Amino acid sequence: MSPERLSRRRFLGGLAAGSGLLLAVPLLNACGGGATAPTAAPTASGQAAAPTAAPTGTAGGSPTAAPTATAATVTPVATGRPTGQTVKLTNVENDSRPLDNKAYENVYKAFREKHPNIEIEFQILPWEQAEAKERTMAEAGTLPDMGRANFAASLVKLDAMVPLDDLATSDYLARYPKSWIDDLYFEGPDKQRHLYAVAWFAGDKAILINKTFFDEAGLTRPASWTTDEFVEAAKKLTIPNKRWGVTIDAAGIGDPWQNFWLCVRAFGGGFVKGRASDSKSPEPVTINSPEFIKGATWWRDLYKNGYAVPSAPTDTYKERDANFMSGKAAMMWQGPWSLIDQRETLKKQGWELAALPLPKGPAGNPQSSGLAGLAGIFSTARKRGVVQEAWQWVSFLCSDEGQKIYSGTNGMLPASQALWKDPQFANDPIYSGYLEGFQNGDRDYPIWAVGVQSVFDQKGVPMMQGLLLNQLTPEQMAQQLQDEVIRFLENNGIKVPRG
Amino acid sequence: MAAYWSMLRKNAVAYLFLLPACVSILFVDFVPMIYGVRLSFYVKNIFRPDYQPFVGLQQYRQLIEDPLFIRSFLQGWYWTIGSVIGSFVVGMVAAIVMNQRLPARGLIRGIILIPWVVPSALAAMMFALLLTSVGLVNTVLTNLGVIHDWHPWLSDPRTAMPALILTNTWKGFPFFAVMLLAGMQAIPVELYEASRIDGATAWQTFWYVTLPSLRSTIMISTLLSTIWTFSSIDLIYIMTSGGPFYATFTLAMFAYVTAFGTGQMGYAAAASVVVALILMIFTAIYLYAYLRHSDD
């Protein structure tokens, strides 16, 4: 072939055709969706897409065995791949606080000593965008292999999670309080409830206080207090244009609603009549009640009377935390998140951190305690045939050993009951308000109201803003929210009896 | 027909070069767009994936009856018009400054362009900190005696949208400044000399010489900015999330929250189609203005 025969036109033409093909192949491949060949043959439980386990209406997997400190047994696994072959996994987390990264690092270090053949890459999807992004990734089949599964309710609906019924033993689950185990079960594509998550930390709420400000204001720290006493303290702690008694968040997802709902529940309001944990099938929704109105009014008046930071209507949990840690506010509702970090930050400024129980209203001080840090395995791991390896990580993170390393690093509360008695947690005053709260916890809404948290986050939270800004009365809010919740449930095929 | 094939053969290489771009546009733009339009005719709720009935135009009817949609639509225009006018006015002033023979002109031009290169998320966080209760804005205004009590700018429904517009103006004015500066430098010097001989004041020169000469540039940059601003949510999402109590909820936010907040994909698709139709009108005007400008 003589060089003269390859004209510039021919060369460029060939180049263009090649480029076109190169671009078209991955695009067509991407549109094929999930056509990627698994990297290894699926293992026995890797094929457990449609589990055969019996339905677990309530706490089907509820253990009867007493919790033990070392009950973190894991089903033995056979990976079906040659020994020594390194498996790379991706884990997703929604907490971007620095100490959380450090906590993961420490757990991973301990994990690698036991499983040198499993390498994990850690990704963070920030909490505010995590659910939306994970849903989108689930639709596109691009979820990581495993990780934080707090949005399991919607991901399970998309068949994006792997049931764990065959992986977690009853001993493993027995470490959690019996009444919390329901939170780990979700209705799968086969309309049966399956175990889709395990947990590595628990959550409830307490009032975090700047003890130094309390002392300066001549306030004593009560062992328990009422909503009236709380208001009185907030009033005394407020210094106009300098400091506010309390910081509340009325923007963002999760926290704002949970904190508001605690106030409503302290006055006797609730999603249904009686305990939400006891409600197993649809019953009349009782949001629109005189008790809700009283609780909402109490919460609004903290702001209206000038005891709460004025930016509350657009403050998310981040601004709320910043308000508290910068000394702009003296109290806040807070879960046991990064308590060690918060204590250190306050200490650097010469202040002391303490936790008080929630104030008691006419209905006591009901808690929203339960399992807060859920971990699960996504369908990506099933497609890649790495369910067993993913379970090794998830089960280690949620084991007593993993929980102790994690919570010990960043100041969370472990989910294993045995660890609550560990001196590391039991003797530290910053945990005391929380550990007490575990005794009277209840769910925010019943298990049959799947996905209703999105209504609270997307409709309820703006209503809270309207309440603070006097653009909505508590009565209007109660009525509108009840209507929104019922509309949502009915749109999702859940028939709600009218009260 | 033969002539057509002959032309196609003659330009085959050119078409082959266009192929990668066409394929990517087809898959990245048109396929999702068609899917989105199709989705708007179905109820698709993320919490109920097994129930997706065809409902025709019902969701569009629902949109018209949805007070939040109407409010978002109007606020979307408030946000867009406010931001575009603000950016244009500041951009014009900046362009005039940059067009002068000033010492350190290069440095001034560089400084003026800074907001453009700052990522939107960073700009949003920066302004959110400036506007917070104990932020710099309140501190300065209180010390100057302009206000007596700290004002929660982003948490007051009356000031939240203006605060967002201010932020977007800061972020968007360099675009106008650069476009207008390029336009100003293309104005023949003779026009300015003639106006000076005629005894025109600086204002008259600007009004009767500069502004008319910039007509096409203003038209094109304003239309582009309108299209970008109407569909943007980054600043709003980070600074107020559409609050307080929907005071900064725009149509783009409505579509986003409906899809990813409450999982109503079909309803959100219908809202997105409305946004796309509005933007298509502006794109058509832009193309018409651009082609006319090219002809000139």
Image (cartoon, coloured by chain):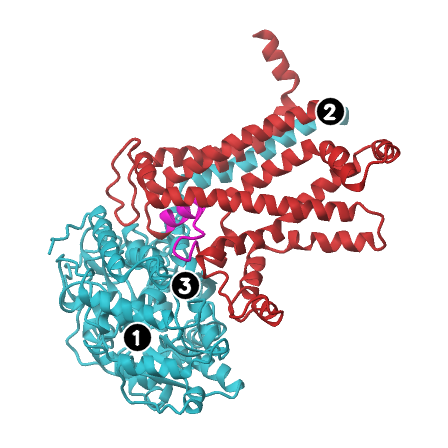
Chain colours: A cyan, B red
Residue A115 x/y as whole percent: 41, 71
Q: Nearer the viewer, residue B227 or B144?
A: B144
Task: Tell me where the magenta segment starts and ends, as one range.
Answer: B242-260
Do the residues indicated by labels 3 and 2 lie within the same chain of the protein? yes
Please tell me the numbered disc located at residue A310. none
> Mark 1 and mark 2: span between their CA atoms?
74 Å
What is the C-alpha distance between the residues marked 1 and 3? Answer: 23 Å
Q: Is residue A169 visible?
A: no
Q: Nearer the viewer, residue B191 or B72?
A: B191
- Residue at the disc numbered 3: A313
For the residues bearing labels 1 and 2, Cβ distance under 8 angstroms:
no
Amino acid of disc 2: Ser
Label 1, on which residue?
A204
Q: Is residue B258 magenta?
A: yes
Which corner quadrant holds the N terminus of chain A? top right
Circle 1 Cα neighbour tier, 10 Å, few/some/many (<14 / 14–19 / ≥20): many
Host chain of mark 3: A
Which of the 4 quarters of the picture holds residue B270? top left
Pinpoint the chain carrying mark 2. A
Give the residue drawn at x 30%, y 54%.
A154
Residue A207: x and y, percent? 35, 79
Callout 1: chain: A
Name the residue beneath numbered marker 2: A7
